[in-house]
Amino acid sequence: MRLGSVAGVIGSLPPNRLLGVPLAVLRDPLGRFDLATFFLSLTIYSPILVLYYTGRGLSLFQVLSLEAFMGLATILLEVPTGVVADRIGLKRSVTLGFFFQAVWVGLLVLAREYWQFLAGYAVLGMAISFRSGASEAWIYETLKARGEEHRMSQAHGAFWAASLAGRTTAAVLAALVIREMSEPSFVLALELSAGAMLLGTVLVLTVPNRQAEAELARQRGSLRLARDGIRLIREHPALRRVVARSVLSDPLPYALLFLFQPYYQLAGTPAVLFGLSSAMAAALGALVARAAFSLERKLGMARAFLAANLLPVAGYLAMAGLAGPYLAPLLCVLTFSAMQARYPLATAVQNRHIASYNRATTISVISMLEGGYALAMKLVAGYLADIDLRLAFGLLGLVPLVAVIRFPLRDEHLESQALSTAEASHCPRSDG
């Protein structure tokens, strides 16, 4: 299509829309951040990544070891990158995370040897670490500057939904881009994905930084920031309970993404439903994530968070006892989508108790705990799945159920209790 034709198409769009995106979204900094996240999630290469690796000579063990190595790298880098985010700025940290993810995809195109893939996955672990705590902190600090902290579950739900929408769109684009199972098609999918991630990086640069106590964070020093974050979680009674509940009740959606395929095989699910149900789960999950704020307003945070924890538990336990060609994908879609309401609510609850000056650091400490828990649970679930898939689903359902019972959250645990700088670094000990 010639340039004049493109201009004509753009000129014919309604004045309040540009390329299908409402201009109101582009005017809102958080809307631009969500759009950037959408582009970051356009992983067109996902359906063929394992085939790409094996085509370049990697064994399946080496392929799986890359994921484990990335998880370990992310855990080790979480707190250092959180400290960096608080000291250099949340915007710079998130921008680095976006950029390094595009670099990782570029390294995959160039890699030929196993060690080169490992180096690429170290970059991916760094990219995830730079983004994880800083993204959540940036959203909350932006809302705080507007006096809208109470809308955190809504804002983070939109952010989470944008990521899921990107994955859904990526699955559709993969069907269009990957016309044949050949390396040129695989490389094209990787290159287009890297291009989308770079576009997301550019969009992030347009979002203003929001950090109420950035100068204080720089004066505090790196070790002090990390020590304050750890001490806050350990000695702030309400936050300690919230973190314990959040970490141990994590339904681990990525574990389900690995286990649903053998589950479908055992159930005799038609092959066409493998990809279709994945797209449906991501699309429905995006809607559920956006509905988390409405659930909070209708039920109150305590009941909404309880429901968001128990629904995935019910799904896993149902999969442990039920199967069928069409029942299996239905249960997987409902379970995966139900999980997505939990994350916006969890972030909203946690941020109510964290001071601004080391918000990214404290969130990164929590993310490190979540990463360690997820790594251990996935290993145990994988071991049990080799014995009997029902045991793996039972584990993934029962552990969160025990966490919900062991760490009940009452209204007083969920009320805003963000401490001042002095209080945050000298929390009183309590067993609350």
Image (tube, rainbow, N blue to C red):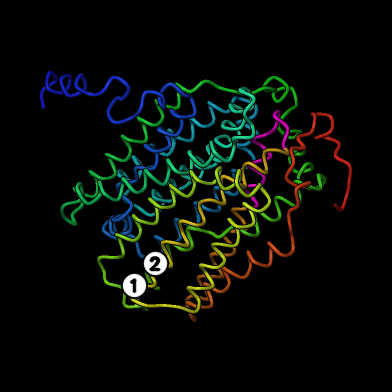
* On screen, residue 255 above or below 127: below
Disc 1 packing (10 Å; few <14; some 14–19; many ≥20): some
Find residue 265 and report its horizontal and vertical position in percent. Answer: 34, 75
Query: Foreground residue, 84 or 367?
Result: 367
Query: Foreground residue, 77 or 360?
Result: 360
Which of the 4 image quarters holds residue 262?
Answer: bottom left
Label ID, residue 173: none
* On screen, residue 15 above or below 154: above
Q: CA distance from mark 1 to mark 2?
A: 6 Å
Q: Could you tell whether 67 is left or right of 430 in the image?
A: left
Judge whether residue 355 is colored magenta. yes
* On screen, residue 151 above or below 108: above
Query: Foreground residue, 269 or 75?
Result: 269
Disc 2 packing (10 Å; few <14; some 14–19; many ≥20): some
Report if the CB atoms under discs 1 and 2 are less than 8 Å apart: yes
Which of the 4 image quarters holds residue 395?
Answer: bottom right
Find residue 409 and report its horizontal and vertical position in percent. Answer: 73, 54
Task: Please give the residue where the numbered disc 2 appears in the rendered image.
Answer: 330
Q: Could you tell whether 393 is left or right of 260 in the image?
A: right
Looking at the rendered structure, the kind of residue marked 2 is Leu
Task: Please give the residue where the numbered disc 1 appears in the rendered image.
Answer: 326
Judge whether residue 316 is colored magenta. no
Which stretch appears magenta?
354-369
**Magenta stretch: dominant secondary structure:** helix
Quadrant holding the N terminus: top left
Find residue 367 and report its horizontal and vertical position in percent. Answer: 61, 47
Residue drawn at point x = 30 percent, y = 43 percent? 110
Looking at the rendered structure, the kind of residue marked 1 is Tyr
